Amino acid sequence: MNNHLGDAVLCLDDGRLLSVNADLSKDGSGTWGGTLFATIGAAATSDLANLTEGTLLIGNRTGAFVRRDTSDWIDSPDGEFRLCIEGNGDAPF
């Protein structure tokens, strides 16, 4: 699969799991990334605002990612918190 548009789980450092909507893709070389959308109020905004790396769970597969720009959430749609991520290793989809 080269795309995933749907549910995913963001695994936070403190062990909490946060349901997110994911719009992810990967290219022919396996490089992957995309956008995660969390509903505001689902987790403390400061936890997400300062997140620079993490783990994403889709089904029973996990994938590590980095978030290079922590200001990406500023133009988020109303009621959502947007994170732009770049995969670090194998894609979880």
Image: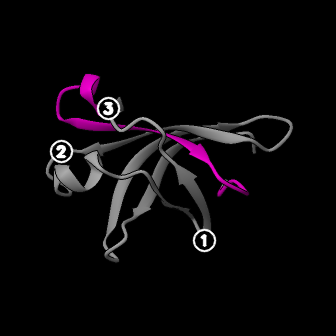
Residue of label 3: 71
Sequence-first tag of 2 and 3: 2
Structural distance between the alpha carbons of marks 3 and 1? 30 Å
Where is 42 relative to 39, above or below? Answer: below
Position of residue 37 measured from the top left corner of the image (x, y, whole percent): 36, 40
Circle 3 SS class: loop
Structural distance between the alpha carbons of marks 2 and 3? 16 Å
Asked if marks 2 and 1 touch (Cβ < 8 Å), the reply is no
Residue numbers of the magenta segment: 73-92
Q: How many marks?
A: 3
Apparent side of residue 34 relative to residue 71 in the rendered image (left or right): right
Sequence-first tag of 3 and 1: 1
Say what amino acid the circle numbered 1 marks.
Answer: Asn
* Image-quadrant location for residue 17: bottom left
Position of residue 62 measured from the top left corner of the image (x, y, whole percent): 60, 66
Circle 2 SS class: loop
Say what amino acid the circle numbered 2 marks.
Answer: Ile
Where is 87 relative to 90, above or below? Answer: above
What colour scheme does the image use? one colour
Q: Which mark is residue 60?
A: 1
Taking the view exactly as shown, the residue that stands out farthest to the top is: 75
Where is 16 relative to 74, above or below? Answer: below
Residue of label 2: 40
Say what amino acid the circle numbered 3 marks.
Answer: Ser
Q: Nearer the observer, disc 2 or disc 3?
A: 3
Position of residue 44 measured from the top left corner of the image (x, y, whole percent): 16, 56
Apparent side of residue 45 relative to residue 71 in the rendered image (left or right): left
